[in-house]
Image: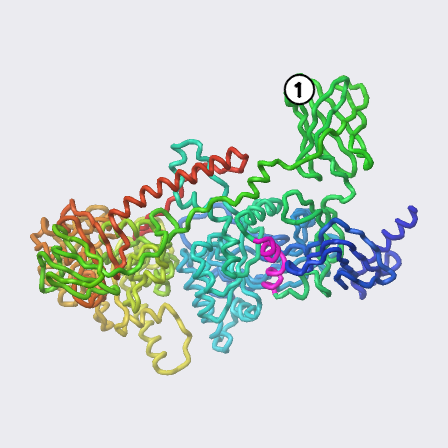
Amino acid sequence: MNRRLFALAFLWCSAALFSQDYFPENSGVKSKNNNYTAFTNAKIFVTPTQIIDGGTLLIQDGIVKQVGKSVTLPKNTVMVDLKGYSIYPSFIDVYSKFGVEQPKKKPGGGRTAQYDSNREGFYWNDHVMPENDAIQKFKYDDEKAKALRKAGFGVVNSHIHDGVVRGTGVLVALNGKESDAERILDDTSAQYLSFSRSIIKNQSYPTSLMGSMALLRQLYSDAKWYAAGNSDTKDRSLEALNENKNLVQIFEAKDKGHALRADKIGDANGIQYVILGGGNEYERIAEIKSTNAKFILPLNFPDAYDVSDPIAASYVNLKDMRKWNQAPSNPKVMADNGIPFSFTLYDLKSPDKLKEKLMKAIAYGLPKTKALEALTKVPASILGKSNTVGSLQTGRQANFLVTSGDIFDKGTILHENWVQGQKNVINDMSQKDIRGTYDLSAGGMTYTMVISGESSKPKIEVKQDTNKLKSKISYANGWVSFSFATDEGKKNYRMAGLVDGASDNLKGKLTLPNGNESTFTAVKTAAFSEDKKEDEKDQNAPKLMAVTYPNVGFGFTTAPQSEHLLFKNATVWTGEADGILQNTDVVIKDGKITKIGQNLSAGRAQVIDATGKHLTAGVIDEHTHIAALAINEAGHNSTAEVKMEDVVDNEDIDIYRQLAGGVTSAQLLHGSANPIGGRSAILKLKWGESPENMIYSNSPKFIKFALGENVKQSNWQSFSRFPQTRMGVEQVFMNYFQRAKEYDIKKKSGQPYRYDEELEVLAEILNGERFISCHSYVQSEINMMMKVAEKFNFRLNTFTHILEGYKVADKMKEHGAGAGTFSDWWAYKYEVKDAIPYNAAIMNKVGVTVAINSDDAEMARRLNQEAGKTVKYGGVSEEDAWKMVTINPAKLLHIDDRVGSIKEGKDADLVLWSDHPLSVYAKSEKTIIEGVTYFDLKKDQQMREAIKKERSQLIDMMLKEKAGGGKMQGPKMSKKERMTCESL
């Protein structure tokens, strides 16, 4: 018998060692195992939807040869009877780090930035590395592979998780018994991208999300230009990008909004990305579906917060509480909407958390069939490997799991994970389940012993009467050993025995506390049963809080609709030649102002009694930094290629707060980190709408320029970037406009040219198609900027801040520039030392179009009061003061044909005030945009009560989770940074 086993082992080893037939053999006899193995009488999941009860799976040489109810078995077939067991395809992870050396961030760093690439012969940006190949850094690690196999995985797809463009991945079978020659399924499995900078590269650009997006746009344009043979130099990065273009393209988004941003870039370049999601896709599911992308979903559902301390609980915001409650429903929502997705271990602390998270998703309504597809069929499809892996159809690799039952049931045991036909034992099938309740006799005493937990990894509890004793157990290879201590841990009893497969009882050797040896017996009195509470917890679908728009506090449960409204007897501030009209009616319909007059009727319109109240056009903030995910792209001294439209944050609570202050439109400006900043986003503050729907249709084109301390980096020790002086700032403008002029001439000539998004934007300025809002303070620089514009034959649209505008108001009037300024800010830095509160009034008197803006999230809530200060400082009339926050900023933004005043045919962007709009007592009772009420003072009170109720419900759920032994995390406050001009 022993000789026979030895011979079989030898043949098996030979097959492993000599699987590559053309390799010479010098250490023994060369042979190959051609036997078949048949797994019979099993419940076989050939695919998630093709299931065979009592079927047979036949494999040879690591390949599925046949599968079915009736399979003809060759003579040289080894039979394995799996009656009562199930067979599933092994899992596939598309987004792994397995075996690939990952970059590590270098310690230290300084404030002096590196602006240029430190590579030669590659793309100009170090964060673009398509030339990287994961296979070059791959080293198989069977210890880590063992953990993955234990979780059910047979194949993983790894790459280097670093940079904006990361290079190619490697597809690996977790076969520890073969070499890379067999286990590497594809050494260029996909190309990977992200919005994240490399952690080991120091080049400054990009510093922001919008910079990463601009970089990708320019990269794809450059790749096409390079592929057409237009470059005189070699670029290994562009060559690699072009070589990889036919591979699967996988984009790391990690957020619903980023997924949509990535898809937009892909669509513009004819690429359909596969997208690594963030688990919050349910919040914008219709838009996610419209991408037509396949998704890779992490299962890193957040743990409940420990809210037992009411003070600490108040730190946790509603959005984070909701995420705990809603995130596990994400896979179900994706499945319900027909969006294909796979699961990944990415961002899970360890592979052994997989089943727990899967069971949670299933408890939240994910069908088991879809869960299995997400681990097998879909990842294979994503990688274009459906003919190789992901199912047990004929011809596929023999990668499969043997389980004791339904793979997604809590009590199911994974016994074996076969990879490429190689058996890996996870939990020995022959090992008996010893769980249950016993009467333990040891050392002349009787104890109650309960063995629970997993059958392969049991837990033990020993009691003497009602006293629970310290105990531990181990069980492997048919041997059980356990111990317990009495007399407060002073006396230790140690036991070990071979489990008898024919008996439910245990017996064996006992070592007493004094070292003497004896025997023990454990008589089974009750079989093991799962905790009923745990079962009930798993089976009971949790209560889900409603998703709102946006999904934060004060979000709408349903999207608000445009209304047909009639305001009666209001004091109407028209902002037009008609001035202020008393006891006047205004009708709005289909988002427009349709009638203005007295004693109006409007059919079925909802009538709003505005007696004693004031109706105005919505406030317009010419300069804001709310509703943004980034403000500055500080990586270069000119970043005209970046767009604030790319980073609009529609969930910023300051949108709602500013609606409460009557603000309906705003220019979201780039910051002031560089002389030439990024392009603006002109927004309507449509709370609950998507970022795209907040942006003005046919939006005027604007860009932010900046002068002064910020752009020459006066306030931080950075000396490596030009400019460092105000003179240098002027030369930046001169140089870039000259280059843009030459670029535009070449473009218009019909000659071949390299598309440059940055110069395209600057050429738009020269052609009068884009307008400049220029951050400015000092008189000399204001004059300089106007002279530069006049030299290149264009007009500066707006000087913003311009606290020395009163010194140059006549020149601004002559040039045609407007002003967006503060009412009474001064002395907050050196270059504003000459600011005066009469600035707005003086410029207005000279004839400059003047707006009062905020540049501050808090101030924007009370721009009506800021406008009122110009009445005090300079004697501006009330009507002109009000125009500084309505029609004047509308004129500066070139949207005065649509908004800024109350006029028939204009957009119904209105505010109903409780009092005189310039008064500190005035409150916005209704703020309306295009006929939709986005803020209502009475509804606001109702929402506050609803938020209290919802928080209370979520806190109760979390307390129950803690009481049930659920894993908790400490309370923490997540708070969005309030952006300013200088935010990086």
Q: Secondary structure at mark 1?
A: loop
Answer left or right for 428 relative to 332.
right
How many residues crowd mark 1 within 10 Å: few (<14), some (14–19), many (20+)? few
Numbered-mark total: 1
Depth check, front residue: 724 or 309: 309
Q: Amino acid at mark 1?
A: Asp
Judging depth in this view, the residue of 467 and 921 nearest the camera is: 467
Residue at the image point whose x is 32% and y is 50% from the top: 979
**Residue receiving disc 1:** 465
Quadrant of residue 650 within the rendered picture: bottom left
Residue 475 screen position, x and y as percent: 74, 35
In magenta segment, residue 376: yes
The color scheme shown is: rainbow
Position of 337 with respect to 464 (left or right) is: left
Q: Residue furthest front?
A: 603
Q: Is residue 855 visible?
A: yes
> Looking at the rendering, which quadrant does residue 369 occupy?
bottom right
Query: Which residue is found at the position 76% from the left and 44% from the top?
Result: 429
Say whether residue 55 is magenta.
Answer: no
Q: Is residue 797 above or below residue 946?
A: below
Residue at 35% x, 75% y: name it. 743
Majority SS type along the magenta span: helix
Coordinates of residue 594 in the picture (x, y in percent): 19, 66
Query: In this orientation, which residue lies closer to the viewer: 320 or 629?
Result: 320
- Residue 487, how many percent across, how many down? 67, 16
Q: Residue furthest bottom?
A: 750
| Residues shaded magenta | 367-383
* Percent coordinates x, y for residue 932 in the rendering: 27, 58
Image vertical order of residue 250 relative to residue 246, above or below: above
Q: Is residue 802 visible?
A: no
